[in-house]
Image (spheres, rainbow, N blue to C red):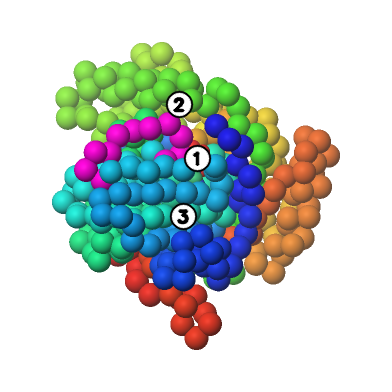
Amino acid sequence: MPEPSRQAQLLSSSVFRRQACDKLGPECRLFRAPGRVNLIGEHTDYNQGLVMPVAINRYTYAGAVPARAGEIHLESREFEDIYTAKLEMLQPEKGWGNYLLGMAAGLQQRGYKLRGTRLYVQSEIPFGAGLSSSAALEISSGLAMLGIAQTWPHQGMDMVWAAHFAEHHFVGALTGIMDQFIATFGRKEHALMLDCRSLEWEPVPLPAECELVICNTGVRHALAASAYNQRRHECQLGVEHFQRRLPEVQSLRDVTWNDFLRWQTDLPDAVMRRCRHIISENRRVEEARRAFQQHDLSRLSELFSASHRSLRDDYEVSCPELDAMVEAAAQAPGFIAGRMTGGGFGGCTVNLVYRAQVSRFIASVSAAYRSQMNHIPEIWAVESADGGGELALVNDQELLIRAAT
Ligand code: ADP
Ligand code: MG
């Protein structure tokens, strides 16, 4: 696969419009979808549990124009491969194009009539860092294909399921729905608490004095994929164990804390700890919602720390770099709450930081992490954002003229 070239470069939407217009011509329309960071609720999504992601102001942009009938043509600023495919015969191929080919197939399968589209995509979201560049790519380009077909999502969940289809059947990644969901439904100044079983969700207001700061360890340990499958398997063993005692249990979501305490004794140690993480993490998400609603920042601090410890000791998906970053943040000025975020074995930590002290926080974490790990981390202060939509230039300003939902 070609190396990503100018990946994760921050651009204003107007610069991207200019680049897209250079590529596709002046009639080009512009769509975007945000990356995300998960505040709390880690590894709970595939256990039918609770998560609390926030959409962030780092976007993937898709420029689009009509193309020859029945054809899609895909280019990315980040990769050299170019794809051309017939809408009536979409097949998985190799490389990044699968996210979009799968998205087109997923939308058609849900009854949307697409038209020939030429797409040019570009991203400010680093790949594979746990900020979900893939869902932002799927949702931005899915909206672009619908926009060119003179239609729009009848319901936001169509985007989510089409993108989920792309990941499962074209990319081959057995993901949950959190990433696609937040890229579609995200809401500025809010996190969304999503119940991955019922798909009910609610906006959770973020405190105005808090900024979100993401610290990237820059590492991705090779263990990640096999450990992920192993954790899924161990959770399944846990489900079978509790099912034998409580026949109504379908997933770890159905096991209450009291059930866990009562029936955990004869579980193998590793499986017991995996279950303890998932069941306690669901409770922490509920508690975090309450703490956000009551503006209880010290409770949030405890909950984030408890989540990190549980991921480190019970679920065993942290690594020395993530632990060092969390410790560096906890000592830094302005720190409120922090923990690892995403699947683990590298990637990022997420922190709530007093807005007025963000620069000092970043300088302090950067220095402490560097002296311990001999590596200067990338650190981004980000804002919460709305979900995907179409942009238009109005009085020299790029405005979101149509939201996905
Ligand atoms: P994450 O979603 O956490 O960033 P993934 O491995 O799920 O990590 O998705 C990253 C992949 O998505 C990249 O390797 C690439 O194939 C694809 N991708 C994301 N953004 C773009 C883009 N702008 N252009 C082409 N491919 C992209
Ligand atoms: Mg992804």
82 relative position to 302: left or right: left
Give the label, 2 or 3, closer to the camera: 3
Residue located at (52% from left, 80% from top): 397
In space, the residues marked 2 and 3 are separated at their CA atoms by 32 Å
Kindly indicate the quadrant of the structure image that contains residue 228. top left
Coordinates of residue 26 in the picture (x, y in percent): 46, 71
Residue 291 appears in the rendering? no
Q: Is residue 250 left or right of residue 94?
A: left
Q: State the image coordinates of residue 190 (x, y, percent, origin top left).
A: 44, 64
**Residue type pointed to by label 3:** Tyr
Which residue range is magenta in the image? 87-97
Query: Label 2: which residue?
Result: 228
Given the image, on which type of amino acid does mark 1 rest? Asp
Quadrant where the N terminus is found in the figure: top right
Residue furthest bottom in the image: 395
Foreground: 149 or 321? Answer: 149
User: Element at badge 3?
Assistant: strand
> Circle 3 sits on which residue?
120
* Label 1 with label 2: CB-CB less than 8 Å: no
Amino acid type at image mark 2: Tyr
Residue 81's label in the rendered image is 1
